[in-house]
Amino acid sequence: MYLKDENKIWIASGNDGADPIYLLPEMMNRHGLITGATGTGKTTTMKAIAEALSEMGTPTFLADIKGDVSGMCKPGKLKGKITDRIEYLKIQDYTPTAYPVTFFDFFGQKGIPVRLAVSTLGPILLARILGLNDTQTGVLQIVFKIADDSNLLMLDFKDLRSMLQYAGDNAKAFTTQYGNITTASVGAIQRRLLTLESAGAESFFGEPELDLQDWFTTDDQGRGAVNILDCVSLSQDPLLYSTFLLWMLSELFETLPEVGNPKKPKMVFFFDEAHLLFKDAPKALLQKIEQIVRLIRSKGVGIFFITQNPSDIPNAVLSQLGNKIQHALRPFTPNDQKAIKAVAASLRSNPDFNSETAISELANGEALISALDEVGSPQMVKRGFIYPLRCGGGVADPELVESITKSSPLYAKYAEPFDRYSAYEALEENKQREAQQREQEALEAQQQKELQQQEKEAAKPKPKPSGGRSSSRATPLEKALTSTLSQFGRTASRELARGLFGTRKK
């Protein structure tokens, strides 16, 4: 709940509601971390913060990787655990509320389609999606460079395939200027593209492209848009999921203006299953993520990572996350015990309880919260129950999702793909011109050969007429027949010649 009078986000309460716990809007761009074991309330906490941000007019982005976030588009119900929590926290002004949700989906089935041009994503991130090694990544970079230098747009898969084939067919010509292009690497990239296509990811590449500025909107009540990306199917391809999220951060970092330290964030991103962002990421990519997380806060953007254990996040990134919400962890193994001890040590201690003990005792929906104060210093960790959601829980009905999606003004902008003139069309035209040129050269060569044959035949000496008596004694009928046959032969020869030279009239 967002308290306008106090300019605070009431996120939780302890001691029967007598000890409210707040997050400060001006510190939300210092990022945050929500951790805990499966089923302990991480998603509920994420949604509770998103509700408060929406009420203060800040748009949010939520990656719905488990399919349990879409209920934010409908009001909650006063029953069961919601009623119990309201009574326990002594909440007086609870009102079930539906929030201004816009649904997006990579595959266009549960929301507005999300697309990116191949050239927009770039060779480095695309190589990560395809799982290429260093050599193959180098070849892909060369292909992108050739396309850029040749003013060939690569928008979708067929553009990329055409460019790969073009580069492979002309590898010798490109080697001196761009570097070695091996047939094996080109073939490997083509096979990876085929695998990605068979998984249905081909629809993600193309136009119209997603414009992230369309997420910075408010409704007629001034509430920030809640942009939900359905990632249930996408989670089957974690590289595509994580790479898209990285692209979003990079795009915002490069395009948004500097705003310093705003009173509230311009947008907050929530990345569930955050460990997928960092899994198997090369060192260079990890350094890029760290740089973006460190610097993007000056653009007014906050990032919350949601995962089971803080150890899922690299230390360089973890150190940038100021607001920490820790749900229960269960010490089933010695490694779990070590993890709990490390988490407790990272929180500013509270003399009222032992953080290490509390982490394993927390009930579902209860958390240890260490928020930043007005000057950006971590406050003493507090223990409390998360404020009950005003929105609906679980999954929204498909009919409701479809209705909201099609009524969105963005639906008309993104629903239908289009295919404009790009690398594929340009290279196909070039192939046709080359084929026509080869045909013309072949025809001219054939004509030249026939002309030479005719000249050779004409240069041969003609046979002399026979001096025999039979020839001089031909009858008038024989003479007429011979004349007719000769005329027929000359006519047939002329018709054949016109046909070969392509000038025959019909």
Image (cartoon, helix red, strand yellow):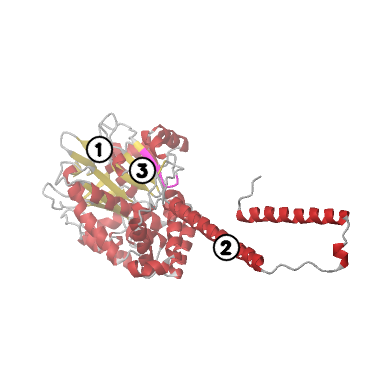
In-image side of 162 versus 352 (left or right)? right
Type of the residue with mark 2: Gln
Q: Nearer the viewer, residue 397 or 116?
A: 116
Type of the residue with mark 3: Ile
| Residue 78 position within the rendered picture, expressed as x and y whole percent measured from the top left | 36, 33
| Residue 23 position within the rendered picture, expressed as x and y whole percent measured from the top left | 20, 45
User: Of discs 1 and 3, which sits in the foreground?
Assistant: 3
Contact flag, marks 1 and 3 (Cβ < 8 Å): no
| Residue 222 position within the rendered picture, expressed as x and y whole percent measured from the top left | 25, 32
Q: Is residue 317 above or below residue 84?
A: below
In the picture, the quarter occupied by the N terminus is top left
User: Of discs 3 and 2, which sits in the foreground?
Assistant: 2
In the picture, the quarter occupied by the C terminus is top right
**Residue 105 painted magenta:** yes
In-image side of 363 versus 442 (left or right)? left
Which residue in the structure is indicated by mark 2? 448
Q: Secondary structure at mark 3?
A: strand
* Mark linked to residue 228: 3
Q: Nearer the viewer, residue 127 or 182?
A: 182
Type of the residue with mark 1: Met
Q: CA distance from mark 1 to mark 2?
A: 88 Å
**Of marks 1 and 2, which one's residue comes earlier in the chain?**
1
Q: Main secondary structure of the magenta part?
A: strand
Q: Which residues, given as a range, are shown in magenta?
A: 102-107
| Residue 360 position within the rendered picture, expressed as x and y whole percent measured from the top left | 30, 57
**Of marks 1 and 3, which one's residue comes earlier in the chain?**
1
Crowding near the residue tagged with mark 2, few <14, some 14–19, many ≥20 C-alpha atoms within 10 Å? few
Which residue in the structure is indicated by mark 1? 1
